[in-house]
Amino acid sequence: MIKVIENFLDNNQCKSILELSNDSKIKFESGDTFTAFFQYFKRINDDYIDVNIVKNLQKNLPLYNNCSFKYLRLQFTDETVKQSEVFHKHLNPYSFIVYLNDGFSGGELEFENGTLIFPKMGTLVYFTQNEGHRVKNCVGKRWCLVGFLYNDMFNPIVKKML
């Protein structure tokens, strides 16, 4: 399942999340991942995000309230980050991406089934682990809020970061 919601966040909401990139309490991490080389991101939880944005996530993402966070991250990629050309799937049952800015080229999200999502500020893309996907290279900084959710039937429902 792939779900796309345009205008999920407005410009001010996107900017408020982008301001977290300047928060000195949250450090950027970088390194090679399966999907990209030298990807940059900050691990955060939804306590950092405006309550109205969290309510919007709860309203629009199936099972958001019934899943615990594996983690949320604020990440950017640019022309220095080489994306993997290999399609991959996540171990987590649910993932989402919210595009936080415009002003770059490329960076499309491509799914194995042929669906191609062109990044646009404020757009949310929600998908299940069955959807093989990859990100195309981009020029300019592309900022996203990315969430990886799981549902653990053996533990109480608690939002947490790992």
Image: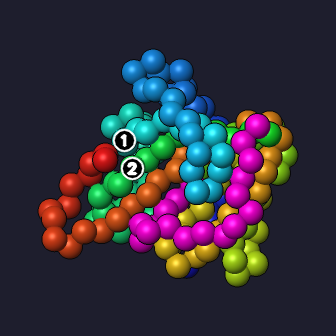
Dominant SS type (magenta): loop
Query: In this rendering, is residue 90 above or below 160?
Result: below
Horizontally, residue 4 falls left or right of residue 102, namely left
**Residue 71, numbered circle:** 2
What's under tag 2, amino acid-wise?
Answer: Tyr
What's under tag 1, amino acid-wise?
Answer: Asn
Spot occupied by residue 88 in the image (x, y as percentages of width and height) = 60, 69
Spot occupied by residue 48 in the image (x, y as percentages of width and height) = 39, 34
Give the mark, 2 or 1, whose residue is nearer the N terminus: 1
Few, some or many residues within 10 Å of mark 1 (<14, 14–19, 20+): some
Please tell me whether mark 1 sits on a helix, a strand or a loop: loop
**Marks 2 and 1 close (CB-CB < 8 Å):** yes
Query: In this rendering, is residue 144 above or below 147?
Result: above
State which region is magenta. Answer: 80-97
Spot occupied by residue 55 in the image (x, y as percentages of width and height) = 39, 50
Q: Nearer the viewer, mark 2 or mark 1?
A: 2
Q: Residue at x 33, y 37 (%)?
A: 47
Pick the residue in front: 70 or 125: 70
Q: Is residue 117 visible?
A: no
User: Which of the 4 image quarters holds residue 10?
Assistant: top right
Spot occupied by residue 29 in the image (x, y as percentages of width and height) = 51, 33
Q: Quadrant of the N terminus?
A: bottom right
Instruction: Identify the coloring.
Output: rainbow
Q: Residue at x 57, y 50 (%)?
A: 33
Residue 96 lies in magenta, yes or no? Answer: yes
Residue receiving disc 1: 45
Pick the residue in front: 28 or 21: 28
Q: Residue at x 44, y 69 (%)?
A: 91
Few, some or many residues within 10 Å of mark 2 (<14, 14–19, 20+): some
